[in-house]
Image (cartoon, rainbow, N blue to C red):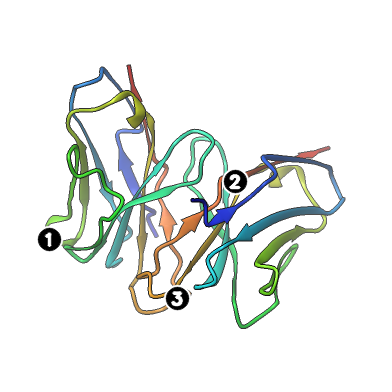
């Protein structure tokens, strides 16, 4: 079974530029998550989708971050404009369903963003 | 406000000995706890979990203990192997949170041959 795919793996941009990340979850997984992991911290949830609907985006900085999951499969996360403090690893995770607490979240390898 | 705390940034043990990683939480609504393991340049991978109705869960060399009254859990690895060297994250969910995970900062475990 293929895992969660993310691209690009690395990205370097200057502040005020825009950047987009792509995630393809495990086939059949209805729930998709985007996390931000700053160096030395644990992953922090930015947004959670159930199919193509947003379940939780309470910690997404909506003035600069946006995310979509058209057709309930793959997803993109965009930052516009980027700030220095956005430097982090952006992790995508997927989960089979929202119905069982024991369903595991599977993580992709992440995209390491450096904002100069 | 950190709801899941891993107070030891790093831990070093000898191969074959026991590794004990600790985690504390403050939110009494958490009712399911997980440990994830992360190698450099990879995403976290699920290791073991425990429900709040249990106080112990074992899977091979890995055992997680939960002390609800103390809001404390620990991960025991016996015997430790060099391949166990990684960052270990404690995570918690519950309270109708749509299965949202709250992570600790992680503990870097180094197992020396």
Q: Which residue is mark 1?
A: A71
| Residues at marks 3 and 1, CA–CA distance in whole angstroms | 25 Å
Secondary element under disc 3, as helix, strand or loop, is loop
Q: Chain of mark 1?
A: A
Front position among marks 2 and 3: 2
Secondary element under disc 1, as helix, strand or loop, is helix
Indicate which disc residue A99 carries. none
Of labels 3 and 1, earlier in sequence is: 1
At a point 68% along the width and 64% down the height, the residue shown is B73
Q: Which residue is mark 3?
A: A101
Q: In the image, are marks 2 and 3 on the same chain?
A: no
Q: Chain of mark 2?
A: B
Quarter of the image with the N terminus of chain A in it: bottom left
Q: In the image, are marks 2 and 1 on the same chain?
A: no
Question: In the rendered image of this protein, does residue A105 appear above or below residue B109?
Answer: below
Front position among marks 2 and 1: 2
How many residues crowd mark 2 within 10 Å: few (<14), some (14–19), many (20+)?
many
Cβ atoms at labels 3 and 1 below 8 Å apart: no
At a point 49% along the width and 51% down the height, the residue shown is B1
Q: Nearer the viewer, residue B10 or A1?
A: B10
Q: Residue furthest front?
A: B1
Q: How many marks?
A: 3
Question: In the rendered image of this protein, does residue A103 appear above or below residue A73?
Answer: below
At a point 49% along the width and 41% down the height, the residue shown is B42
Q: Quadrant of residue B13?
A: top right
Q: Position of residue A38 (x, y in %)?
A: 44, 36
Q: Quadrant of residue A115?
A: top left
Q: Which residue is mark 2?
A: B106
Cβ atoms at labels 2 and 1 below 8 Å apart: no
| Residues at marks 2 and 1, CA–CA distance in whole angstroms | 35 Å
């Amino acid at each position: 079974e293929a895992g969660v795919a993310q691209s690009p793996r690395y990205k370097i941009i200057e502040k005020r530029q825009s950047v987009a990340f792509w995630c393809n979850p495990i086939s059949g997984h209805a729930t998709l998550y985007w996390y931000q992991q700053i160096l030395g911290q644990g992953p922090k949830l930015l947004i959670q989708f159930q199919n193509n609907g947003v379940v939780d985006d309470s910690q997404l900085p909506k003035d600069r971050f946006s995310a979509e999951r058209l057709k309930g499969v793959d997803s993109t996360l965009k930052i516009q404009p980027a700030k220095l403090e956005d430097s982090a690893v952006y992790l995508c995770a997927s989960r089979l369903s929202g119905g069982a607490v024991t369903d595991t979240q599977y993580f992709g390898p992440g995209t390491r963003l450096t904002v100069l | 406000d950190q709801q899941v705390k891993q107070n030891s940034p790093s831990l070093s043990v000898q191969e074959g000995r026991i590794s004990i990683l600790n985690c504390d939480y403050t939110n009494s609504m958490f009712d399911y706890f997980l440990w994830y393991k992360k190698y450099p340049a990879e995403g976290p991978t699920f290791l073991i979990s425990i429900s709040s109705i249990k106080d112990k869960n074992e899977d091979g060399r890995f055992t997680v203990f939960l002390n609800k009254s103390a809001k404390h859990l620990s991960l025991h690895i016996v015997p430790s192997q060099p391949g166990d060297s990684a960052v270990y994250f404690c995570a918690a969910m519950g309270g109708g949170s749509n299965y949202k995970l709250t992570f600790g900062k992680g503990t870097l475990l180094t197992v020396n041959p």
